[in-house]
C-alpha cells in the first residue's frame, strides 16, 4: 500500500492505475451508499472513493457521514464519472473519528448556505471549508513567495523585536506589555505609573513596525527584510484593519525613493504571479466565488473584471506614478467631490487622503494600481526624507483596487541635523531615539524601505471582502476568541 496525499494522487492520475493505495481525509459527502468525496486539505479537489456496500457492514456504512475522518485502502481505477480522471475502489475503510450529523452543523461545511461571519466562530471546521482552505493555501503560497523573492535578490531576513521599548515609532496606537499585578500597580510620587518597577524597568509595548530596528540592520547588512507579527490597538472596526497582522518590511541601504517604488512594484507582481502559477485550483474556485458574489451586488458596486482578470491586469500593466499634489488636483475636480459625495471633502492641499479618495483614484479615475509619492510632511512620519521644497517628504503609498493602501514606504531622512529638527517638531523625546540617531552619526547613507501588510495582499489575491477572512485567528476590537 502506497500512502498518498489526495493532491499527490490526483496529480499522478492514470500513472497510478491499478496501484494499491492508502488515502486519508474527511468525508465531504457520501451519496447513493456508494460515492465518498474525500478531502485531506492538500488541495481544492476531492478524491472520489467508490465502495460496494455489500462488502461493508451496515454499522460502518452508517458512520460514513459528513466530517467523519477515515482511512481508505483501495485500488486506483479510471473514473467513469465526469470531472475526475481517477477514483479509488475501496477495499478497507477505517473510521478515525465519527462526526454525529445531528451535532455537526452540516451547513457549516457548505459556506454557500452559511455566512463567513458564522464560520469565524468555528475555529477548526472553518479550515475544512472550500473557501477558507483555499484562502489559507493562497496565503501560504504568498508567504513563501515573499521569502523567495527577497532570498533571490540577496536580502537578509532579520527578526526585529516583538516587544519594543521605543514608543516613538508613531505608526499607530500600541498595546502595553506589562508584568505588573494589575490590582496593585506601583505609582511614583506624582501619581504616575512607575514603570521602573516593571519587568523591563521601562514602559514596553507590542511592536507596530520593525522599521526603525530594520534601519539599524540595513546600516550594516545593506539589504534586509523583516516578516513578522505586528500589533495596532487602533479601534478601527473596518474590513481592512486587524489588531494583529503580519507585516513585511524591506529596508535597503543606498536606495532612493524611485528605486524603492520600482522594487515595490516588482515585488508585488512577483508574489501575485507566484500565487497564479502555484494555486491554480484554489484561484479558479475563488474566482467562481467572486463572480457569484458580484451577481448579488448593486450595479454601481460591480467591478469590471473578475478575480483572475484583475490579477492579470495588475501583472500586465505598469502602476501609475503620481505626486500627492497632482492627486489633490484630480480629487478636487472629481465628480464625487463636486457633488459632495465624499465623506471627507477635499478642499485644499495638505488634506490627509482617506480610503474613499484612494479608491476613487485607483478604481474610477486611473483604473489601475497607483503609487502616490511626495506627501505633505505634516501628515507623514518624522523619519521621512524632506524634499527641497521644505514642505513635502519622500513618502510613497501603493494603492490597489478594492483595497486602498497595500504598501506604505519612504526614503528615510539620513541627514542628522534635519532629522533632529523633525523629531523636535513632532514632540518626540530625542533621548528615546539615541540608538536610531546613532545610525546617522557614524557613516550615514541614503536608504529607503516600505511595509506591506500580508493580509492586504491575501485579500487582494483571493478577492475576499473582509480582512478577517484571510487570517486563521483574527484579532479585532472585542474579539480574541480561541
Ligand atoms: P492605513 O492607512 O490603511 O490604516 P497605515 O498607513 O496606518 O495604514 P502603515 O503604517 O503605512 O499603515 O503600515 C504599512 C502597511 O501595513 C500598510 O500599507 C498596510 O498594508 C498594513 N497595515 C497597516 N495597518 C494595518 C492593520 N491594522 N491591519 C492590517 N494591515 C495593516
Ligand atoms: Mn501608510
Image (cartoon, helix red, strand yellow):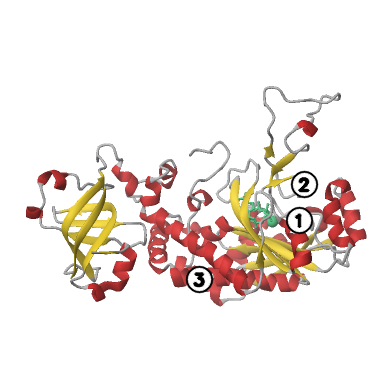
Judged from this view, the residue extending furthest toward the right is 417
Out of 293 and 459, give the one closest to the viewer.
459
Q: Which mark is residue 247?
A: none
Specify the quadrant that holds the N terminus.
bottom left
Q: Position of residue 178 (x, y in %)?
A: 69, 35
Q: Position of residue 120 (x, y in %)?
A: 44, 44
Q: Position of residue 47 (x, y in %)?
A: 26, 62
Give the labeled residue for mark 3: 274
In the rendered structure, are the residues bearing label 2 and label 1 in contact, judged by CB atoms less than 8 Å apart? Answer: yes
Question: Mark 3 packing: few (<14 Cα in 10 Å), some, or many (20+)?
Answer: some
Left or right, 350 with reference to 93: right
Report, in whole angstroms, how far the alpha carbon at label 2 lies from the one at label 1: 9 Å
Out of 33 and 8, give the one closest to the viewer.
8
Q: Could you tell me which residue is drawn at 87 percent across and 57 percent down?
A: 419
Report, in whole angstroms, how far the alpha carbon at label 3 lies from the one at label 2: 36 Å
Circle nearer the N terminus (2, 1): 2
Q: Could you tell me which residue is drawn at 40 percent across and 63 percent down?
A: 282
Give the labeled residue for mark 1: 212
Report, in whole angstroms, how far the alpha carbon at label 1 lies from the one at label 3: 30 Å
Give the labeled residue for mark 2: 166
Q: Is residue 59 above or below residue 82?
A: above
Q: Indicate the secondary structure of the residue bearing disc 3.
A: helix
Out of 438 and 356, give the one closest to the viewer.
438
Q: Indicate the secondary structure of the residue bearing disc 2.
A: loop
Amino acid at each position: 500500500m502506497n500512502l498518498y496525499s489526495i493532491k499527490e494522487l490526483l496529480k499522478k492520475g492514470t500513472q497510478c492505475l491499478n496501484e494499491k493505495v492508502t488515502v486519508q481525509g474527511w468525508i465531504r459527502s457520501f451519496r447513493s451508499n456508494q460515492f465518498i468525496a474525500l478531502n485531506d486539505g492538500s488541495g481544492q479537489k476531492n478524491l472520489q472513493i467508490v465502495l460496494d456496500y455489500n462488502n461493508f457492514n451496515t454499522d460502518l456504512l452508517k458512520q460514513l457521514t459528513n466530517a467523519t475522518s477515515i482511512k481508505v485502502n483501495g485500488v486506483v481505477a479510471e473514473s467513469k464519472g465526469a470531472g475526475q480522471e481517477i477514483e479509488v475502489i475501496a477495499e478497507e475503510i477505517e473510521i478515525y473519528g465519527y462526526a454525529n450529523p445531528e451535532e455537526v452543523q452540516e451547513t457549516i461545511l457548505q459556506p454557500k448556505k452559511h455566512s463567513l461571519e458564522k464560520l469565524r466562530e468555528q475555529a477548526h471546521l472553518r479550515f475544512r471549508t472550500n473557501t477558507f482552505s483555499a484562502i489559507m493555501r493562497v496565503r501560504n503560497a504568498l508567504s513563501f513567495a515573499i521569502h523567495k523573492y527577497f532570498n533571490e535578490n540577496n536580502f537578509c531576513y532579520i527578526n526585529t523585536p516583538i516587544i519594543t521599548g521605543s514608543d516613538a515609532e508613531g505608526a499607530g496606537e500600541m498595546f502595553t506589555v506589562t508584568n505588573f499585578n494589575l490590582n496593585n500597580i506601583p505609582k511614583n510620587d506624582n501619581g504616575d505609573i512607575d514603570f521602573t518597577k516593571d519587568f523591563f524597568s521601562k514602559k514596553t509595548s507590542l511592536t507596530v513596525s520593525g522599521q526603525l530596528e530594520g534601519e539599524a540592520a540595513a546600516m550594516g547588512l545593506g539589504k534586509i527584510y523583516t516578516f513578522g507579527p505586528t500589533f495596532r490597538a487602533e479601534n478601527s472596526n473596518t474590513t481592512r484593519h486587524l489588531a494583529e497582522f503580519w507585516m513585511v518590511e524591506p529596508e535597503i541601504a543606498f536606495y532612493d525613493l524611485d528605486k524603492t517604488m520600482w522594487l515595490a512594484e516588482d515585488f508585488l507582481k512577483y508574489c501575485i504571479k507566484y500565487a497564479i502559477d502555484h494555486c491554480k485550483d484554489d484561484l479558479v474556485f475563488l474566482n467562481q466565488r467572486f463572480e457569484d458574489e458580484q451577481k448579488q451586488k448593486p450595479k454601481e458596486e460591480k467591478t469590471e473584471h473578475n478575480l483572475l482578470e484583475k490579477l492579470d491586469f495588475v501583472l500586465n500593466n505598469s502602476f501609475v506614478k503620481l505626486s500627492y499634489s497632482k492627486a489633490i488636483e484630480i480629487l478636487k475636480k472629481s465628480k464625487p467631490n463636486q457633488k459632495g459625495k465624499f465623506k471627507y471633502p477635499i478642499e485644499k492641499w495638505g488634506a490627509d487622503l482617506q480610503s474613499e479618495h484612494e479608491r476613487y483614484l485607483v478604481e474610477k479615475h486611473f483604473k489601475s494600481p497607483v503609487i502616490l509619492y511626495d506627501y505633505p510632511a505634516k501628515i507623514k512620519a518624522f523619519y521621512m526624507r524632506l524634499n527641497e521644497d521644505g514642505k513635502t517628504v519622500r513618502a510613497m503609498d501603493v494603492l490597489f483596487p478594492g483595497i486602498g493602501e497595500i504598501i506604505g514606504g519612504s526614503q528615510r531622512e539620513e541627514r542628522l541635523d534635519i532629522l533632529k529638527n523633525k523629531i523636535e517638531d513632532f514632540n518626540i523625546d530625542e533621548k528615546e531615539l539615541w540608538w536610531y540617531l546613532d545610525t546617522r552619526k557614524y557613516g550615514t547613507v541614503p536608504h529607503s524601505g516600505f511595509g506591506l501588510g500580508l493580509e492586504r495582499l491575501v485579500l487582494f489575491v483571493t478577492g475576499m471582502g473582509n480582512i478577517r477572512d484571510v487570517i486563521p485567528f483574527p484579532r479585532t476590537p472585542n474579539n480574541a476568541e480561541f
